Image: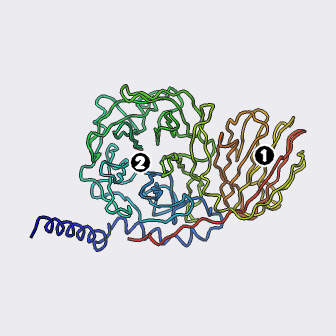
Amino acid sequence: MTTTRRRFVQICSAATAASARLVGAEPDAVIRKAMDSVRAAIPTAAADPARPVYHFHPPANWNNDPNGTIFYRGWHHLFYQFNPYGSLWGHMHWGHARSRDLVNWDHLPIALGPSEEKGEKHIYSGGATLARDGRPRLVYTSIGDREPEQWMASPLDDDLLAWTKSDRNPILTTAAHGKLKVGDWRDPFLFQEQGRTYMVCGGNISGRRWGGGGAVQLYRAENDDLSEWKHLGTVFAYRNREVMNIECPNLFPLDGKWVLIISPHKACEYFIGTLDLDRPRFEPHTQGILDAGNAYASNISVDGQGRTVLWLWGRTHNPESKGWNSVMVLPRILSIGSDGFLRQQPAPEFESLRGAAVTSEAVALGAKRTTLPGFRGDSMEIELELALGSARSAEVELRLGDAQSPAAVISVSQEGFLTAGGATTLLGRSDPYKLRIFVDRSVFEVYANEGVAALYGNLTGAVGDFQASVFAQGEGAQILSAKVWPLKAAKFTLDQFRV
């Protein structure tokens, strides 16, 4: 047998063995059991009229943080914290879905479950990156009856349908910190710079003995398969006595700057500045609130167009009887404005869900409510341009029929604040104000002044054909333009949700 022929046979044999492992082998019992539980809950979740129709959600049950978001071979891959056994937090696994367009999704098999035989109880949050071989790696915080550890998993196929955990796990332990004591150590996020792979993790460095202590630690991969890491130091320490711990840190380049997003057990914050990998030190120049509403736990990916995509958990807090709980906030495209602050815009792909638009001409506003024509439904997009003039504020009210209380009130004030669903964020004075409002049954989102502010929230009360009306506090306000689109449901397929 020639050398070429022998090599060909070896390649075919290896491919056949790999195929057998993927197709013929018994699926992981942990994954199979979890997916059977999810399938049993699907009818209950699908029957709830309050469940959003174009915000991403699992087939059923609880989700929280977006994890391991990555664009690979033409697909946006979203992993997420997932409880396959109920619609309250617990039994953390990693759910998995993919999309070509950020709107319509294929539900894929659960990617990761706890390795109970190794003492693992939960698969906590983490990130993804490409290794030197060009294939993704997932890195997450492994939780058990021990200190947290960082573990890694690799794909068994190019479609990323099946995953295997590294035999080098744990790839990083608290021993890497030497004398530095890092508590609440979790949520790795990975990025590449200058040909090297880096990782940040959140935590606390005060031992919770006094106020503050929230900090971000930086690490560098020391080999090509990302199984060996070196702790470089504390890259960011938050000098805020109210922030005891930092969760889900994301550190990434954007428009010639570096951005750090943190989840500090309250509204997510962002910082824009410079990164020195040698010191190491992230120096913030500007700071802002990412989303003052009910969103949390960010993750970041970069797509095939070079766009930086922000992912956020959208909380809903449903009772367990509904069969589902929480969604993902609409994927947002990030940029930095000329003022040095972050801009967030919903992915333009969601315009594909629009039906026929209904527009209205300019109209003066006063204390009497002006109902927007064409807005009657539970899944809508509204685009408004409001001039305040001398009025103290202009307010948009979403109300279900003759309900006594509105489902949500969205307002802009003369002082430059945006308030929506009880949450308030700084928008800045800018008359007129431009608003984009997305309504999706029981949740909504507001984007103001081309993404200067963005806010996710929950609609209260029953769900049905909402109406939108606008009024002003004071004189001189007007609607300069208004446009309303009904939005179709996104497609969520279960064809690949099997083992």
Q: Nearer the viewer, residue 136 or 440?
A: 136
Q: Quadrant of residue 121?
A: bottom left
Q: Residues within 10 Å of mark 1 (few under 14, many from 20)?
A: some
The image shows a total of numbered marks equal to: 2
Q: State which mark lies toward you, 2 or 1.
A: 1
What residue did someone put label 1 on? 385
Q: Secondary structure at mark 2?
A: strand
- Residue 388 appears left or right of 41: right
- Residue 250 appears left or right of 409: left
- Residue drawn where x is 53% and y is 37% of the image: 255
Residue 495, how many percent across, how many down?
47, 72
- Residue drawn where x is 38% and y is 38% of the image: 193
Can you say whether 425 is above or below 241 in the image? Answer: below
- Residue 106 appears left or right of 456: left
Residue 490, how many percent across, how many down?
60, 65
Residue 425, how many percent across, how many down?
67, 38
Q: Nearer the viewer, residue 198 or 34?
A: 198
Q: Secondary structure at mark 1?
A: strand
Q: Residues within 10 Å of mark 2 (few under 14, many from 20)?
A: many
- Name the disc covering residue 279, or none: none
Which amino acid, by three-letter code, is at mark 1?
Glu
Measured in 3D between alpha carbons, the distance from the residue under mark 2 to the one under mark 1, in whole angstroms, is 39 Å
Can you say whether 364 is above or below 80 in the image? Answer: above
What residue did someone put label 2 on? 127
Which amino acid, by three-letter code, is at mark 2?
Gly
Residue 187, how many percent across, how many down?
42, 44
- Residue drawn where x is 11% and y is 64% of the image: 3
- Residue 462 appears left or right of 157: right
Q: Earlier in the sequence, mark 2 or mark 1?
A: 2
